[in-house]
Image (tube, rainbow, N blue to C red):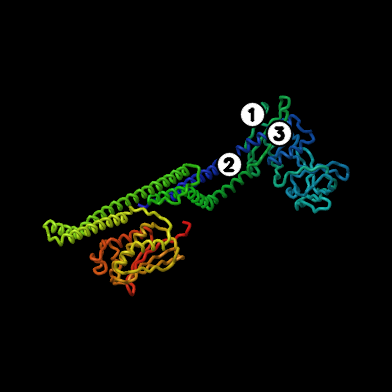
């Protein structure tokens, strides 16, 4: 069965969550948001109208500034507003005016409610003191005659507005004057709704009895009203104005719902397009990246755990996160470190056990080998001693007794030397010998050896010749190195021609910091196939190293072990006139 990764599972879960969440938001918008917004709009506007009515009742500003304050409120809250008497007569209504001082000395209010291009007028930049010429006509509003402009031209600027084609040319009047004051709506915040305001007043006044009683109690009310001609839905607010505990006037406000509905309709189309074209893609991308971000530490933990399962504890770094995953990562790294340390300790312990087992096995092999070699090598001299001893017991002739006794003593000495050499070699092979390193000169070592072996060489009428470097210091165990050199020289004497010369040479290799000591004799050579075997214990070449020539057969084996213990080299080679043996030592300075 194919398993699903955690990234895919998180991706699927997040995608489902985002889809459900987005669908819920869109559904809520389609079904509830418009009504919610209308309710909030009505509640907010009602509070603001209540506050305005209270400020108006307390006469917070001078009466002549009431139109200006109303204008500011209208532009900020997108409403039409009027102050009415309890009978419905307009006290203050649309405040947007241009007050002119005409050239005839009259003060003329110019209403801009029906100006054909209100947005151009608001950005025209009229200021008090500007000279203007206005073309327009008079009309009646709540029993008052107001001048409504078609075209306004500021001195030094192009005109704004146009004269309608169906305008009564005879009724169009042109008036010039100076601007006294200006109150215009903010750009983009005004619609021509004076007609709807007048229609609303005609519908609601006089007020029905129930609403009048509610207002007399100081309670405001609002309701939705559809203008029958245009079909525009509006919210109508009536706020009582209370002064000295009595309702003296009404604040009547009107705001359209059509623009709100159109905006929500456009939003619904936008949401539908966004949810299909962009929303789904955005949700997929967000779900993918969120799942990757969340799953990244989990994947790292999984990789670390997989490496630990393979006993790989290297280069594990904790996740830098202050949460449960970070704590788990730190615990995993700590566990990895502890396991790594424990395994290394176990490995070291196992290595020590292996070395101990190998050492024990080697000791057992050496013991067996020692017993075997000793029994083999001692068998012949013991038989000789036994035979000669039996001859003495049998009371052999008097003239043979001394020879028998000398033979027994010679074989006893030989057995003693053999046992001592075997013990020495066994200790060397077991690594039980500790070197006592010191600095001494190589020619001193050679001189002492020559002095010790001079009598043995003299018996065969042989002489020594020493050549090479002088005063060369070496670093080694002097006693062991003398044992090596004595073994070489004794072999050279034993196997050399009578009356020949034993040559000894000291070579100092300064580049490799080594000193090579060579012992060469004149005599029979060693067979090529025997050159590597002569270092084995108890190995004797038939001619060159026979038992009759003396020796135990362990000398060169001891040489090999001593030189190897010094981590140096040794060897043998045939020469045109005989055989040469050599070994190396580490050179040293005189100060050491």
Q: Is residue 362 above or below residue 45?
A: below
Mark closer to the observer (2, 1)? 2
Residue shown at the point (25%, 66%) measured from the top left = 549
Residue 264 percent coordinates (x, y): 59, 45
Q: Secondary structure at mark 1?
A: helix
Q: Which residue is mark 1?
A: 210
Q: Residues within 10 Å of mark 2 (few under 14, many from 20)?
A: some
Q: Which residue is mark 3?
A: 52
Cα distance, mark 1 to mark 3?
24 Å
Quarter of the rendering containing residue 88: top right
Q: Is residue 340 above or below residue 557?
A: above
Residue found at the very far left of the displayed protein: 394
Q: Which residue is mark 2?
A: 34
Residue 36 percent coordinates (x, y): 58, 39
Residue 525 visible in the picture: no
Residue 426 percent coordinates (x, y): 29, 55
Mark closer to the observer (1, 3)? 3
Q: Nearer the viewer, residue 568 or 396?
A: 396
Q: Residues within 10 Å of mark 1 (few under 14, many from 20)?
A: few
Q: Secondary structure at mark 3?
A: helix
First in sequence, mark 2 or 1: give its number. 2
């Amino acid at each position: 069965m194919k398993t699903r990764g955690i990234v895919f599972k998180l991706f699927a879960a997040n995608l489902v969550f985002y889809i459900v969440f987005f669908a819920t938001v869109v559904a809520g918008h389609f079904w509830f948001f418009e009504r919610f917004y209308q309710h909030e709009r009505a509640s907010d506007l009602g509070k603001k109208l209540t506050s305005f009515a209270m400020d108006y009742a307390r006469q917070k500003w001078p009466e002549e500034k009431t139109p200006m304050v109303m204008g500011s409120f209208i532009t900020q809250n997108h409403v039409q507003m009027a102050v009415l008497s309890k009978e419905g007569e307009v006290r203050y209504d649309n405040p947007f005016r241009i007050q002119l001082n005409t050239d005839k000395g009259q003060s003329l209010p110019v209403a801009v409610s029906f100006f054909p291009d209100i947005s151009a007028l608001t950005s025209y930049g009229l200021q008090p003191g500007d000279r203007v010429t206005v073309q327009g006509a008079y009309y009646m509003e709540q029993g008052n005659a107001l001048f409504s402009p078609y075209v306004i031209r500021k001195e030094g600027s192009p005109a704004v507005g146009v004269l309608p084609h169906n305008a009564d040319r005879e009724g169009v009047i042109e008036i010039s004057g100076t601007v006294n004051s200006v109150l215009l709506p903010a750009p983009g915040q005004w619609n021509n709704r004076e007609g709807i305001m007048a229609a609303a007043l005609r519908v609601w006044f006089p007020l029905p009895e129930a609403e009048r009683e509610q207002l007399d109690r100081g309670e405001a009310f609002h309701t939705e009203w559809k203008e029958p001609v245009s079909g525009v839905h509006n919210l109508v607010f009536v706020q009582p104005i209370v002064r000295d505990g009595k309702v003296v006037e009404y604040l009547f406000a009107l705001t359209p719902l059509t623009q709100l509905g159109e905006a929500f309709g456009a939003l619904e189309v936008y949401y539908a397009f966004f949810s299909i074209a962009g929303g789904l893609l955005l949700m997929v991308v967000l779900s993918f990246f969120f799942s990757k971000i969340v799953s990244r530490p989990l994947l790292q933990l999984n990789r670390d755990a997989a490496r630990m399962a393979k006993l790989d504890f290297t280069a594990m770094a904790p996740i830098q996160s202050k949460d449960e995953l970070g704590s788990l990562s730190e615990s995993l790294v700590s566990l990895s470190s502890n396991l790594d340390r424990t395994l290394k300790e176990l490995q070291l312990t196992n290595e020590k056990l292996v070395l101990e087992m190998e050492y024990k096995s080697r000791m057992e092999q050496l013991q067996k080998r020692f017993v075997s070699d000793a029994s083999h090598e001692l068998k012949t001299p013991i038989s000789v001693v036994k035979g000669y001893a039996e001859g003495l017991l049998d009371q052999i002739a008097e003239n043979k007794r001394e020879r028998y006794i000398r033979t027994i003593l010679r074989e006893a000495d030989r057995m003693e030397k053999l046992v001592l050499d075997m013990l020495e070699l066994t200790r060397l092979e077991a690594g039980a010998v500790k070197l006592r390193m010191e600095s001494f000169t190589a020619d001193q070592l050679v001189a002492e050896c020559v002095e010790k072996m001079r009598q043995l060489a003299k018996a065969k009428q042989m002489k020594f010749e020493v050549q090479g470097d002088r005063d060369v210091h070496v670093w080694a165990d002097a006693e062991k190195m003398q044992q090596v050199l004595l073994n070489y020289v004794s072999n050279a004497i034993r196997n050399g021609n009578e009356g020949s010369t034993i040559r000894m040479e000291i070579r100092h290799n300064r580049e490799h910091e080594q000193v090579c000591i060579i012992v060469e004799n004149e005599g029979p050579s060693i067979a090529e196939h025997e050159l590597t075997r002569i270092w084995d214990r108890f190995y004797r070449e038939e001619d060159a190293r026979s038992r009759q020539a003396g020796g135990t057969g362990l000398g060169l084996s001891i040489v090999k072990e001593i030189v190897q213990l010094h981590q140096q080299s040794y060897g043998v080679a045939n020469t045109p006139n005989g055989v040469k043996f050599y070994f190396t030592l580490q050179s040293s300075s005189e100060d050491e």
